[in-house]
Amino acid sequence: MTNANDVVIIGGGHNGLVCAAYLAKAGKKVTVLEAADQVGGAAATREFAPGFKASVAHLLYLLDKDISKQLDLEQHGLRIAKAGLNTIALAEDGNHITISAEGVDGGGLSSQDKAAYQEYRRFMSKFAGVIGGLHNKIPPRITYQRKDLIALGKTALNLRMMGREDMREFLRIAGINIYDILKENFDHPLLKGALSLDAVLGTNSGPRSNNSVFTALHRMSGNTGKAAGAVSIPAGGMGAVTEALAGAARKFGADIRTGSPVSEILMDGNAVAGVQLANGEQITAATVVSNADPKTTILELLGARHVEAEFAQKIGNIRAQGNAAKLHLALDGLPDFKGISQDQLGERLVIAPNVEYVERAFNHCKYGEYSSKPVAEITLPSIHDSSLVPPGKHVLSAIIQYAPRQLGMGWGAGKAAFLDSVMELLDSYAPGIREKVLTAELLTPEDIEHDFRMAGGHWHHGEMSLDQFLMLRPVPKSAQYKTPVDGLYFCGAGCHPGGGVMGSAGKNAASVVLAQ
Ligand SMILES: Cc1cc2nc3c(=O)[nH]c(=O)nc-3n(C[C@H](O)[C@H](O)[C@H](O)COP(=O)(O)OP(=O)(O)OC[C@H]3O[C@@H](n4cnc5c(N)ncnc54)[C@H](O)[C@@H]3O)c2cc1C
């Protein structure tokens, strides 16, 4: 039995670490218990073959600049290996398109499409800014209390301040699908395909699914201080971000214990009393903050018997079916992508040749099948950071969709065949890549669920959508981070403002704990 903790945090993912750092900075005695042998959760660098390292969450585009500054992450070793990556929409014939914050080029794009892209960036960045403005705010409750009414009023005012036309457009498109919006604005199939990918990465949806505009906006909504959606690669991989966060938390006095899975949240009457580890050790604390996803926290670690049946049911109904797989390739040398120069190889490469292709790739998963022709977001981080590989070698990191958590044939039977489809796809864009592969690691949503303890293998701990947003995330009666159980709080991606390596959920949760 260990005593004298003010706060125990279950999980040392990036949000748990941010929460720990702010609480410790405010003088609380904090212990973080992380099940894995390293901190970071999905925001980690993983040695998947001897000498070859890859980030699980591989691109930084949401990390809150105030959090970076307040926790002095640079001082704790965070460096960016490459900032402002362009996106290159790969074409099988090598006639690709380059997409950046400034404009689009290549692929025989018309001047109309180029001009339309400028306007698309303008309104999407503006709308994403409205969502980003909510990231570091505690979602208001739907009550008649003054505080909540003022917060709701401010949100409505921010919408109105967009101007009449933009506000109307925001309300028109926020809940609908990206397919229609891209069709309204562009002609070029490859451009539409690549832009649609940003709306469905990490989600259980296709371009024609409702909410896909919202997920595209979420991706662009980071308060990063850079252009909306600007993408960078941290030196040392994403694990360097979370190691810097852990360094900050430790500096303020937090105790971080890895290899310490929590098996149970302990109760004393109606209030939490601490946690029990899998090895039987009990740690007492009047406040427990969970970085684990809401389903795991309430249904597994706490036990549904400690909450009202309706609340447990709502937690059980959170939509959190993972559909993204992660590929790591250890390569003997750089691959040759058709039409891509050496300089371009270090950019963000996407395979989404047209929006119908992306929708078809999604169709499979509705029936418990993986996509036979998947979509992909590819990076070669070792081009910018040689610390990830042995001399002369390279690593390819790719998000591959669609790979449903519930595969009809089971992932035990399906994984090798899916990997084969993925390699076939890569080979059609980078002929000969197979011969350069020394080791391949494919993480299916089942692996992600197991390795990172994310229920459903969903990388945002729950679908990012309007029905699971703001005061509805994860569910009402816990959207302000405090659960109905006295002393128990959420701080992970399952609560507002959702997934991605951002840190705001952890920071907001800390402010709620401190306000008690
Ligand atoms: C394959 C993949 C690719 C992604 N790519 C990107 C990307 O490129 N860019 C981006 O911004 N985001 C990306 N994401 C999403 C992003 O990684 C997540 O949204 C984010 O990491 C969530 O952070 P978190 O701290 O809330 O939770 P997590 O990272 O899930 O951390 C939760 C932690 O809690 C621990 N835990 C759970 N249960 C227990 C227990 N019982 N006892 C102790 N510890 C426990 C887990 O081990 C884990 O370390 C990706 C995710 C995945 C899976």
Image (cartoon, rainbow, N blue to C red):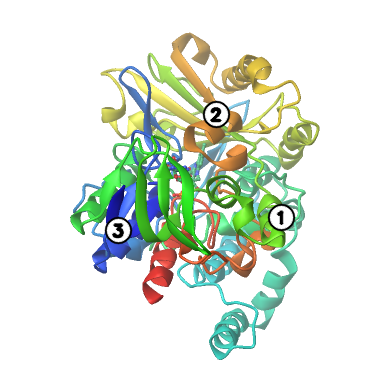
**x, y (%) of residue 64?**
39, 60
Q: Residues within 10 Å of mark 3 (few under 14, many from 20)?
A: some
Quadrant containing the C terminus is: bottom left
**x, y (%) of residue 436?**
44, 12
For the residue pair 63 and 92, the one nearer the viewer reads as 63
Report the residue that reaches farthest toward the right.
Answer: 367
> What residue is at 72 percent from the left and 65 percent from the top?
173
Report the residue that reaches farthest toward the bottom.
Answer: 146
Q: Is residue 158 left or right of residue 5?
A: right
Which of the marked residues, 2 or 1, is nearer the chain's N terminus?
1
Q: CA distance from mark 2 to mark 1?
A: 26 Å
Q: Secondary structure at mark 2?
A: helix
For the residue pair 160 and 47, the one nearer the viewer reads as 47
Disc sitting over residue 447 in the figure:
2
Front: mark 2 or 1: 1
Residue 49 quadrant: top left
| Residue 153 in view (yes/no) | yes
Disc sitting over residue 5 in the figure:
3
> What residue is at 66 percent from the left and 40 percent from the top?
190
Front: mark 3 or 1: 3
Which of the marked residues, 3 or 2, is nearer the chain's N terminus?
3
Disc sitting over residue 62 in the figure:
none
